[in-house]
Image (cartoon, helix red, strand yellow):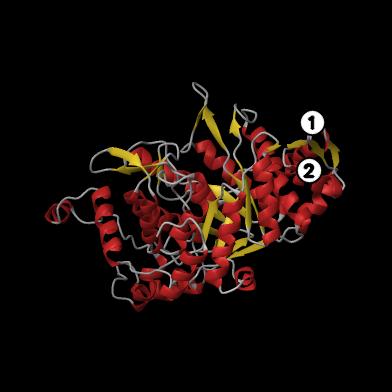
């Protein structure tokens, strides 16, 4: 049973008072401290929208009133479409979905314990794999093709995904020309520009630089994407004790301001642009200022970020599901499960990085996608909670069975047994004797078997006519 789009929100790390205090502090930062904007176009747009601008320092400040006017222009829901409509999702409120993510440089092989540089072929294979993993609802481009020059990366990454999965494709982008090529390619696949905007099956990510800085190139990318009408994600990645205060509350202030910079700019460019407030916030290992991907604090920060998004009535892109482990061990499992669970229970709309990543998000692993799909199935079951009504309370059945009775053969049991209880596709629940008779395989070995089954049986791709047109009209594609 596929579970998706369920309402979270039962976990609330922030009180209502805390939410308002973080909001007021964020507004004070926007109004009294300001943020640096290094895109000339973006700087002019902020100035034209009524912001105070210091041209020499490239500093922008807005009143709370003006900032909130811009934030309120953004839609409270963003629809992300798949090429197959069964994969359509609506981000907003407390609805919960999960996706892949990252820009991993390496692929880990648990059978050898070694890793290697990722290639474009890996991205294609991961897209095929994720296409068949039901608890992963969206495909965010997870690896960087090491063999390609940067000017060919954007269009090749998106094409590799669109040609191998029917789920929505989200991805970070690197060049203005790459963004334009990707949008043109998607318009060909959609049949027209209007067709793409009516059912956007791609979305793009542009990051600010914490603390309080908008890079020149990424500012220009925000302008280009917002003008196109393609859904835009504006995440920030403040690190406790490094690029934000060491306290979680201080980090949340920086994360809020940094993400709202992109949200506000997008609305200045194109009011009602579908934009997603986002967080990649976490803490650092203060021994060497290393980024941490599997900490409890990362889960707390992103769960609290979901509450801030709900306060602003913005869809939210959270980060969870990663691990700092270098192998598929217990640490890999408990870190991935913990952060994904906190985000989902808080009602984070899209938890990205929720599958496949390890080693501080530097490395992806085929088998981990399958393992994380199992974890996410359990996470979504937890989000669903316990339904209490006359039918589930089952008083009449209890009365009928009476003391010492059983419920094994009851129609009620048959009716609810699959929907009420999560049915694992990977976990082993056999006796030791049965497990040994089936080969005594470890979790990653069973996952490897599942990877092979999917790869051997996945044969979806774009239609030959559309595929040929894309290859002939878009420069730089590697078939």
Q: Nearer the viewer, residue 60 or 251?
A: 60
The span from disc 2 to disc 1 (Cα, nearest Å) is: 11 Å
Task: Residue under label 1, please give it.
Answer: 57
Compared across the picture, whether 283 is left or right of 355 comes to right
Q: Is residue 99 visible?
A: no
Q: Residue 407, located in which quarter of the rendered image? A: bottom left
Q: Is residue 97 visible?
A: yes
Assign a secondary structure to mark 1. Answer: loop
At 65% across and 43% down in the image, what residue appears?
A: 217
Query: Residue 204's x, y, as percent?
Result: 59, 54
Residue 3 badge: none
Assign a secondary structure to mark 2. Answer: helix
Compared across the picture, whether 264 is left or right of 275 comes to right
Relative vertical location of residue 29 with respect to residue 367 in this rendering, above or below? above
* Position of the C terminus by quadrant: bottom left
Task: Residue under label 2, please give it.
Answer: 43
Query: Residue 259's x, y, as percent?
Result: 67, 45
Relative vertical location of residue 80 with respect to residue 285 in this rendering, above or below? below
Compared across the picture, whether 103 is left or right of 409 comes to right
Q: Residue 20, located in which quarter of the rendered image? A: top right
* Position of the N terminus by quadrant: bottom left
Query: Residue 365's x, y, as percent?
Result: 35, 47
Report crowding for label 2: few under 14, some 14 to 19, many 20 or more residues within 10 A (C-alpha): many
Residue extending farthest to the top is 287
At 78% across and 35% down in the image, what residue appears?
A: 58
């Amino acid at each position: 049973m596929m579970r998706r789009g369920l309402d979270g929100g039962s976990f609330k790390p922030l009180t209502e008072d805390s939410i308002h205090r973080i909001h007021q502090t964020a507004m004070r930062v926007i109004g009294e401290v300001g943020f640096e904007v290094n895109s000339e176009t973006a700087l002019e747009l902020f100035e034209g929208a009524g912001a105070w601008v210091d041209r020499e320092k490239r500093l922008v400040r807005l009143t709370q009133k003006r900032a909130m006017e811009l934030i309120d222009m953004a839609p409270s829901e963003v629809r992300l479409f798949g090429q197959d409509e069964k994969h359509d999702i609506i981000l907003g409120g407390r609805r919960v979905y999960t996706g892949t993510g990252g820009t991993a440089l390496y692929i880990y092989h648990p059978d050898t314990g070694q890793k290697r540089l990722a290639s474009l072929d890996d991205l294609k294979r991961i897209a095929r794999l994720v296409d068949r993993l039901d608890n992963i609802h969206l495909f965010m481009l997870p690896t960087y093709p090491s063999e390609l020059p940067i000017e060919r990366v954007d269009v090749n990454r998106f094409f590799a995904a669109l040609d191998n999965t029917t789920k929505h494709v989200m991805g970070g982008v690197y060049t203005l020309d790459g963004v334009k090529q990707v949008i043109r390619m998607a318009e060909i696949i959609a049949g027209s520009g209007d067709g793409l905007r009516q059912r956007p099956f791609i979305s793009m990510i542009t990051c600010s630089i914490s603390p309080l800085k908008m890079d020149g190139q990424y500012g220009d990318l925000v302008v280009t994407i917002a003008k196109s009408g393609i859904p835009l994600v504006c995440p920030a990645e403040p690190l406790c004790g490094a690029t934000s205060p060491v306290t979680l509350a201080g980090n949340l202030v920086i994360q809020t301001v940094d993400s709202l910079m992109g949200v506000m700019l997008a609305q200045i460019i194109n009011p009602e642009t579908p934009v997603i407030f986002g967080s990649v916030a976490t803490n650092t290992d203060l021994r060497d200022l290393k980024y941490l991907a599997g900490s409890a604090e990362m889960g707390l920060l992103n769960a609290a970020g979901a509450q801030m998004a709900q306060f602003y009535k913005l869809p939210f892109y959270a980060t969870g599901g990663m691990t700092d482990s270098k192998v598929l061990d217990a640490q890999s499992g408990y870190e991935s499960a913990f952060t994904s669970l906190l985000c989902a229970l808080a009602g984070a709309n899209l938890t990205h990085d929720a599958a496949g990543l390890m080693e501080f998000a530097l490395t992806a692993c085929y088998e981990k996608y399958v393992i994380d799909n199992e974890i996410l199935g359990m996470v979504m079951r937890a989000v669903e909670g316990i339904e209490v009504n006359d039918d589930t309370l089952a008083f009449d059945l209890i009365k009928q069975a009476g003391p010492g009775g059983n419920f094994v053969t009851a129609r009620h049991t048959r009716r609810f047994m699959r929907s009420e209880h999560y049915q694992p596709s990977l976990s082993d629940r056999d006796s030791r004797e049965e497990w040994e008779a089936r080969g005594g395989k470890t979790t990653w070995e069973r996952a490897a078997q599942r990877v092979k089954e999917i790869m051997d049986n996945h044969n979806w791709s774009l239609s030959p006519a559309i595929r040929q047109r894309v290859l002939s009209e878009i420069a730089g594609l590697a078939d």
